[in-house]
Amino acid sequence: MNPVEIIGKKRDGIELTREEIRYFIEQFIAGSIPDYQVSAWAMAIYMRGMSREETVELTMALAESGEIIDLSPVLKFAIDKHSSGGVGDKTSLVALPLVVSFGVPVAKMSGRGLSLTGGTLDKMESISGYNVNLSMKEFMDQIDKYGIVLAGQTADLAPADGKLYALRDVTATVSSKPLIASSIMSKKIASGADAVVLDVKAGLGAFMQTVEDAEDLAQIMVDIGKGAGKKVTALISDMNQPLGYAIGNALEVREAIDTLQGTGPADLVEHCIVVAGQMLRLAGISTARDLSDIRERVEEKLSNGEAWEKFRTLVRAQGGDLSQIDQPDTLPRAPVVIEERATRSGYLQTINAREIGFAVLHLGAGRQVKDATIDHAVGAVVHHKVGEYVRKGERLFTIHARDADSADVARSRILNAHVWSERPGMPLFYNTLFSE
Ligand code: URA
């Protein structure tokens, strides 16, 4: 088989065979197909898409490119969650301890930021000493001992996905349904999950811009999971505006801490309750699809400090500095902080998550090239949600930057991300066109 022919076939919209997909992934992992050919192949998939059969094959080829973990010696039933990627999405930091506070152990392998979306590992590494690189033995021992672990995928977990993920990030080939579905589901299959809650984002700051596309992506993943014998629940959630107020690694850890201590932003609190609730439902703790039988108890775990205690257990177990999370002001801080105030009064119609995601990426919170180091301190905090009335002179957003120049660039981008309206709330109809 010849990689050029396989790339050409996909470029021309011809369906690839099982053997061709397996060959491509195996040779990529073996180092015989170089990054530039894999990038071209990813772009061909991005442009041409993949059939359901091709997507399943790619998922299994990625999953089987490394070890398939068996968590059964330490977990009777392994529940996982995965977000398709968003701006300000710090849900895992809250939902995991929340689920664990019900006595349901959670072992999660997370990823790094991808394009404009942040990554859980990058956020957790804002806490000094927190070790995301656990060996398989350390990972298993920790879940056995503490019932909670949040680490990076081991080098041997779907290694082909790790390599492909890094290339896609820097070749504008992220937002493709077959590539996202196979990337996410290969990791869930390889990491030994029995049940998964998928948080599929839709909107300006998501890889899927419309609810229809997000539903499509969700359905592909539900079908792949079902085919592999997993229970899967997929939530389609809004990502037109950032989740919560904080965007950027350490800033998001602070907001997650507030949420775990019962003082988080309303949208983030609700989001975490639903994600954690659905995980608990898959674990058999709840039986109501609308979570009505468990909601109050989940809320209580946030207000009574039990979930917070589990987060402390997690940070301590992985070597993180507890004093830093106990006094979040000691988390990394950017030297330049500028506050932008509203120059008019009005309702906020849009707070464009995509623009804010890119602004924060350019501040240094994410990677623009494959192995770039990130700056944990930088980011932005918006001070309002869509639909709110803001008075002239009120704080609109705050930028945390390494220097004045980068702060200035982010400032104008985030300012433009705020769109004003004379009317309250999100408009139901944008316009009406008449022929007569
Ligand atoms: N998350 C993943 O794990 N993979 C993707 O491709 C996108 C989001």
Image (tube, rainbow, N blue to C red):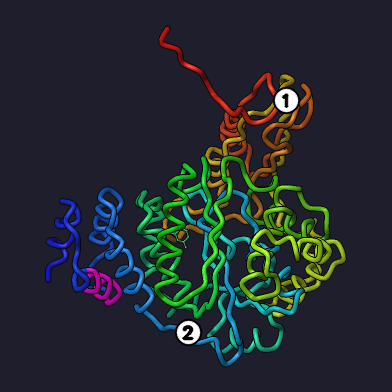
Main secondary structure of the magenta stretch: helix
Badge 2: few (under 14), some or many (20 or more) residues near its Cα, within 10 Å? some
Instruction: Report whether 344 appears left or right of 73.
Output: right
Residue at the spot 27% in from the left edge and 59% down from the top edge: 51
The segment highlighted magenta reads 21-30
In percent of the image, x 70 and y 74: which residue is there?
A: 285
* Quarter of the image where one finds residue 66: bottom left
* Residue on which disc 1 sits: 342
Position in image of residue 116 (x %, y %): 50, 48
Which quadrant holds the N terminus?
bottom left
**Amino acid under label 2?**
Ile
Q: Which residue is mark 2?
A: 69
Find numbered disc 2 in the image and state the secondary structure of the residue it sits on. Answer: loop
Task: Find residue 112 and report its horizontal and vertical position in percent.
Answer: 52, 62
Seen in the picture, residue 367 relative to 192 is either above or below; the reply is: above
Farthest residue, direction bottom = 73
Left or right: 237 as drawn, with respect to 274: left
Measured Cα–Cα span from mark 2 to mark 1: 52 Å
In the rendered structure, the answer to whether residue 77 lies left or right of residue 178 reads right
